[in-house]
Amino acid sequence: MKTIEIKKKLINEINSSTNKDLLEELYNYLNQENAVQETYKLNTEQNSAIREAREQIKNGDYLTNEQANLEIDEWLKK
């Protein structure tokens, strides 16, 4: 489907809709998509933490979700 066809279909759906909540959500979504979003810049400490975490994963130094949940359960029992 071409862009112009999609736009026409959207316009028709919007014009025929009486669902205020849906229209507000669509409006908010379109506003967010069209807004210029700045790229989040990490600081030195954040970049360092990411590098360290990647190295830990590479070396197998991590817990599975199940292992982490078991540790949390044990911690909460104390």
Image: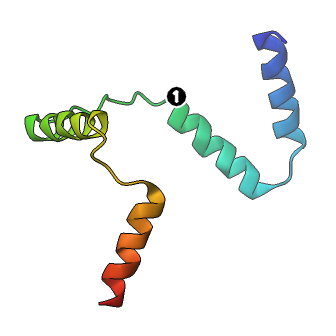
Q: Which quadrant of the figure has residue 73?
A: bottom left
Q: Is residue 78 left or right of residue 70?
A: left
Give the answer, above or below, for where 46 lies relative to 7.
below
For the point 45% across and 57% down, which residue is it?
65
Quadrant in which the C terminus appears: bottom left
Q: Which quadrant of the figure has residue 45?
A: top left
* Residue 22 percent coordinates (x, y): 75, 51
Q: Is residue 5 left or right of residue 22?
A: right
Quadrant in which the N terminus appears: top right
For the residue pair 48 and 55, the one nearer the viewer reads as: 55
Residue located beneath label 1 in the image:
34
* Residue 49 percent coordinates (x, y): 17, 41
Residue farthest toward the top in the current orientation of the protein: 2
Give the answer, above or below, for where 58 lies relative to 60.
above
For the point 84% across and 15% down, which residue is it?
5
Q: Secondary structure at mark 1?
A: helix
For the residue pair 29 and 42, the one nearer the viewer reads as: 42
For the residue pair 17 and 46, the one nearer the viewer reads as: 46
Residue farthest toward the front in the current orientation of the protein: 60
Q: Which quadrant of the figure has residue 39?
A: top left
For the point 67% across and 51% down, which residue is it?
24
For the point 13% across and 36% down, which residue is it?
48
Q: Is residue 62 left or right of residue 1?
A: left
Q: How is the image coloured?
A: rainbow
* Residue 6 percent coordinates (x, y): 81, 20
Q: Is residue 34 left or right of residue 68?
A: right
* Residue 9 percent coordinates (x, y): 86, 25
Label 1: how many Cα within 10 Å (few below 14, some 14–19, many 20+): few
Q: How many marks?
A: 1
| Amino acid type for the residue under numbered disc 1 | Asn
For the residue pair 35 and 39, the one nearer the viewer reads as: 39
